[in-house]
Image: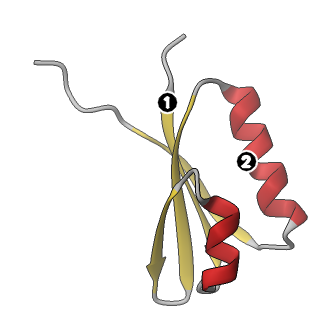
Amino acid sequence: MQAQIYEVTFLGQASTTLRTEFEDCEVTIGPGTTTVRAELPDRGALSGLMERINSLGLDVIDVSMVAPPPAR
């Protein structure tokens, strides 16, 4: 199975301290939201990422799989 890229957006702007919880992800701060983007090997890894976010008490507002770039 090929790894997939996922984006998870939650409410609030992650502080520097909170961003360290996601050092293995790309973190983007938006107006009132934070998005973490990660390449994950399987759905089990996605579940692990979601558990990590939930354990921090963050309110998830969107989870999406990012389409891979078109093959050349």
Secondary structure under badge 2?
helix
Q: Which mark is residue 4?
A: 1
- Mark 2 neighbour class, 10 Å CA radius: few under 14, some 14 to 19, many 20 or more: some
Name the N-terminal-most of marks 1 and 2: 1
- Mark 1 neighbour class, 10 Å CA radius: few under 14, some 14 to 19, many 20 or more: some
Please, what is the three-letter code of the amino acid marked with disc 2?
Leu
Quadrant of image for the N terminus = top right
Residue 34 x %, y %: 55, 75
Residue 38 x %, y %: 52, 46
Please, what is the three-letter code of the amino acid marked with disc 1?
Gln
Q: Residue at x 54, y 53 (%)?
A: 25
Q: Which residue is mark 2?
A: 49
Q: Residue at x 64, y 24 (%)?
A: 42
Residue 19 shown left or right of residue 31 in the figure: right
Give above or below for 45 relative to 66.
Answer: above
Give above or below for 29 relative to 31.
Answer: above
Residue 53 x %, y %: 77, 61
Quadrant of image for the C terminus = top left
